[in-house]
Amino acid sequence: MIYHSYFHDFYDHLPDIAILTHAQDVSWHMEPLLSYSVSFAVSNLDLLEVEKRGYSNLRVSWKNACPDWINTTISDRNSLKLEERYTRDAFLANFGSTSESRVEVPEILAQPCCSQFAVTKESIRSIPQEQYGHFIHWLETAAMNDAILGRTWEHMFQWLFAKKAVDCPVEWKAYCSMYHICFDSRMEYEEYMVLDSSRAELIDMLDVSIAKTAWHWMIGLRTEDLEKEIGVLSQRINVLKRAALIRGADEGNRKISKETLYLDEHS
């Protein structure tokens, strides 16, 4: 509601680029590579890249999102995707009656999660102002739980602004073009992700609950060993990230075309 109200009310007084986020800075909505931080992401965001694309999701990760997260033909309840069985109706209510070319509901809707994005003034104004009023009216009157309403829109902003049902840039390329975090290759990026995942698991094992501490004692797992292993992983992770940031500072290393941004190369 806040997003669409902003688009509607400030339609004639928009900045060149609008960045829309949740209220909190640090949360799981932003990835570890972005320090879990909206302020880190916004501070490092390449606005020229946003202008080139017109619409850019601030999150990059495909987890629980891409390439085919929402199937609009599914009507069964899914505990992880509560909104899936409602998304077809939401799409039709918001887009089906406004343009003949948009009546057919895409089978798949997908983009990185969480409704945090940057969008240009031109992209916002490519939609008639009264259409935002229509979206607001639907949000006010639809017979759905409020949480479901919000989550259906999480999967439709790419259709609204990018004019596509699936908007899933290749992760390691998106980090490079959007945030100037440029790994040397997909393989190096995947190495970073494996290391980071392993470190997260070890940190979770350091949970000091009584039950977990007792279990560690029973299997002979020492806190000192966990901390040492976390330190080793952190050192390698930091080396890779620093190198990626240094590489990303060179404009020549960031030259990824809009088309190749979506090509999943293995090199």
Image (cartoon, rainbow, N blue to C red):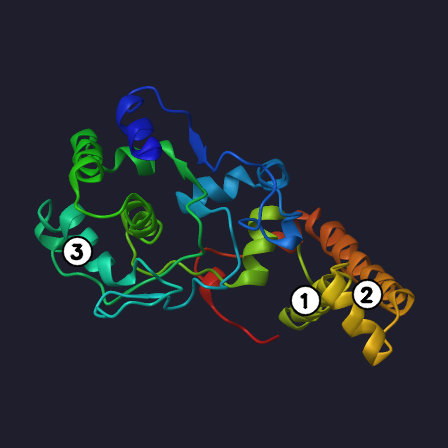
Other-residue count near label 2 (Cα within 10 Å), few / some / many at <14 / 14–19 / ≥20: some
Q: Secondary structure at mark 1?
A: helix
Q: Nearer the viewer, residue 220 or 39?
A: 220
Amino acid type shown at disc 2: Leu
Residue 64 percent across, percent down from the top left: 46, 64
Q: Nearer the viewer, residue 171 or 249?
A: 171
- Who's the residue at 87% across and 62% down the image? 227
Please name the residue that numbered disc 3 is placed on: 89
Q: Answer yes or no: is residue 202 visible.
A: no
Taking the image as shown, residue 134 lies to the left or right of residue 221, namely left
Give the distance between the C-alpha atoms of the residues marked 1 and 3, in whole angstroms.
37 Å
Instruction: Give residue 197's mark.
Output: 1
Other-residue count near label 1 (Cα within 10 Å), few / some / many at <14 / 14–19 / ≥20: few
Residue 195 percent across, percent down from the top left: 73, 68
- Who's the residue at 44% across and 49% down the image? 114
Count of numbered badges drawn on the protein: 3
Residue 222 percent across, percent down from the top left: 88, 70
Q: Answer yes or no: is residue 133 visible.
A: yes
Q: Secondary structure at mark 2?
A: helix
Q: Secondary structure at mark 3?
A: helix
